[in-house]
Image (cartoon, helix red, strand yellow):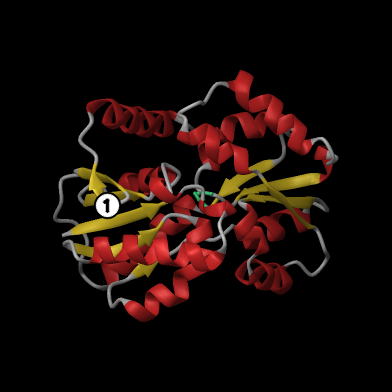
Amino acid sequence: MNIAVFDSGIGGMTVLHQIRKLMPNENFLYYADTAHLPYGEKPKNELKKYIFEAADFLVARDIKALVVACNTATSAAIEDLRQNYSIPIIGIEPAVKPAVIESQSEMKKVLVMATRLTLKEEKYHRLVERIDKHDIVDPLPMPKLVEFAEAFDFKPEDIVPYLQKQLQPFDLNQYGTVVLGCTHFPIFKDIIQQQFPKETHVIDGGLGTALNLKHTLERLHQIGGGSGRITYFKSGVEVKDTETLAHYDQLLKKLDAMP
Ligand code: DGL
């Protein structure tokens, strides 16, 4: 049986990469809904339709769990998905809690980078209300990072000017933790880190999601049984084109090489 990993595009591969490190003996179906990207700029109701199309497609295949490796899709639809399917469904949300605990003790602030929709959603606001008692959390949408990633453009000379422009209104010395609340963003983790003082922590929820999946499958005695094979789909069509598959492979290698 497979583990399905789903995102609007290649962002979910940052989560897939963490899952593969923890659970090498699994087979994966990776689904990128590229026909409807970017999720972060779409109205929630439209998005839900796309998310259910993808989930229906994956659940009809031989899967033992569905990982919604997209903060935006999690915030828009995770509860509805859980009500509709009986397999385990693991989501990802911005790692605000560990960030607040860490930064509060250092008398610093937290910057949450995510998509516009994630930052607008009630799920995010409830999370921040519950945790951010001293008003130290600031949101920052970064939609263009999704575009750069989808174009496989990882060149610092393209990314850095955009980061500088977005970060220009903020006093970066104030931030103890930067939360990467969109699964596309860890691809640029090293470049983002370089914009902040060395002591600033840049964190994301990929490993936590992978651990959550592992514990869930262990509890259900459903761990293992695969060989690490990944089958890729773009909006319901299997990816067979060798150039795209080579790009995916390169991205996984790039993520493997990151600290
Ligand atoms: N990777 C997705 C996330 O984690 C969203 C990217 C998009 O806007 O499509 O939120």
Q: Is residue 152 left or right of residue 43?
A: left
Q: Whole-percent x and y of residue 228?
A: 20, 44
Identify the residue at image location x=71%, y=40%: 200
Image quarter in which the N terminus is found: bottom left
Whether residue 89 is situated above or below residue 28 in the rendered picture: below
Identify the residue at image location x=64%, y=54%: 116
Give SS at disc 1.
Answer: loop
Question: Which sits in the foreground, 209 or 169?
Answer: 169
Identify the residue at image location x=46%, y=76%: 79
Q: Whole-percent x and y of residue 255?
A: 42, 34
Q: Point out the residue furthest to the top here.
A: 157
Q: Name the residue that disc number 1 marks.
A: 236
Question: Which sits in the foreground, 253 or 70?
Answer: 70
Identify the residue at image location x=47%, y=55%: 70
Question: Which sits in the foreground, 41 or 13?
Answer: 41
State which quadrant residue 229 falls in. top left
Number of marks present in the image shown: 1
Disc 1 residue type? Answer: Gly
Q: Is residue 166 left or right of residue 214?
A: right
State which quadrant residue 152 falls in. top left
Q: Is residue 65 left or right of residue 43?
A: left
Whether residue 129 is situated above or below residue 198 in the rendered picture: below
Question: Which sits in the foreground, 49 or 115?
Answer: 49
Q: Whole-percent x and y of residue 3?
A: 26, 57
